Image (cartoon, rainbow, N blue to C red):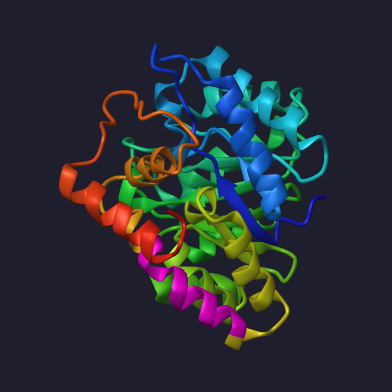
Amino acid sequence: MTNWSGVGTALVTPFTRAGAIDEPALRALVARQVEGGVHFVVPCGTTGETPTLSPDERERVIRITVEVCQDRIPVLAGVGGYDTAEVAETAGAVEALGVQGLLSVTPYYNKPTQEGLYQHYAAIAARTELPIIVYNVPGRTGCNVEPRTLARLAEISNIVAVKEASGNMTQICEVCRIVPDDFTVLAGDDALALPLMAVGGRGVISVASNIVPDRMARLVNAALAGDFAAARAEHHALLPLMLVNFIESNPIPVKAALVMMELCDEVYRLPMVPPSDASKAKIRQTLKDLGIL
């Protein structure tokens, strides 16, 4: 199985002015990630505005990402939802697209119990041989995967990691303490990547790496090598960018930054809209301070 340590970029989905997927821009964004040294890429996650993509569009985004990566780095495709049967069926279909793993967010809105979460992921795992990374983001979904539930899920052979975006460092510490050594814990928040790695985590699924793939890779590589002084220096330098990316709901700020960098057009799909003028000014100043603009 793929080693999911390192930086995985939660890819933005670029759109044309007409509202379609901007395939040339997508190819360029993915190529930039590969060249920037990230360890894997994640199409069709939250940052990719995936709830607004049709099934055909999701398949196309994944196919393009796989084509550009050309086995140079793994592709971890986002596959999630609140209907277990539908998610399991989609997981089986995505397996045929040539990806190396699946990122599956917890069911949102219907707020399952811990037993329901366990059964949900067990059902998905039974439909695919691909490794699955659990995505825990209670601020968006309304439910939290508790550490002991993760420990149970880790006993299923193809559930191999968690993207922990609870923002609760006490919980994150407990997760790192009780899961098996071969179960990978990844940060779901850029600002918590280094603290998580200090207690046993192995990297981050990153928003900031859309903008600075090389620097996020440098930060995480330093921490993986035990050079926490170098990792801290990069963390401190990039913290303003990590924070401004959430000045409004993700992926609004990161896409705005990519627009300013002339890497995609300023097109969102409702209910996402462009950031306010005040937010744009803060994003632009942050990019200038980092020497990006």
Residue 161 in sight = yes
Q: In this view, does 8 lie to the left or right of 129?
A: left
Q: In this view, does 2 lie to the left or right of 281?
A: right
Say whether residue 232 is magenta: yes
Instruction: Give me the residue at 43% from left, 71% from top.
Output: 171
**Location of residue 269 with respect to 117 vertically, above or below:** above
**Location of residue 100 with respect to 52 vertically, above or below:** below
Q: Nearer the viewer, residue 91 or 246?
A: 246
Q: Residue 43 in the image: state x and y as whole percent.
A: 58, 35
Q: Residue 187 in the image: state x and y as whole percent.
A: 52, 62
Instruction: Give me the residue at 61% from left, 65% from top.
Output: 203
**Location of residue 98 with respect to 31 vertically, above or below:** above
Q: Nearer the viewer, residue 200 or 260?
A: 260
Say whether residue 199 is magenta: no
Q: Which of 162 and 195 is in front in this view?
A: 195
Instruction: Give me the residue at 45% from left, 68% from top.
Output: 238
Residue 123 in sight = no
**Location of residue 71 with respect to 51 vertically, above or below:** below
Q: Residue 58 in the image: state x and y as whole percent.
A: 56, 22
Instruction: Give me the residue at 25% from left, 56% from top.
Output: 282
Q: Is residue 125 left or right of residue 289?
A: right
Q: Which of 71 and 284 is in front in this view?
A: 284
Residue 228, quarter of picture? bottom right
- Residue situated furthest bottom in the rendering: 229
> Magenta region's main secondary structure?
helix
Q: Residue 158 in the image: state x and y as whole percent.
A: 74, 47
Count of numbered circles in the view: 0
The stretch in magenta equals 230-242
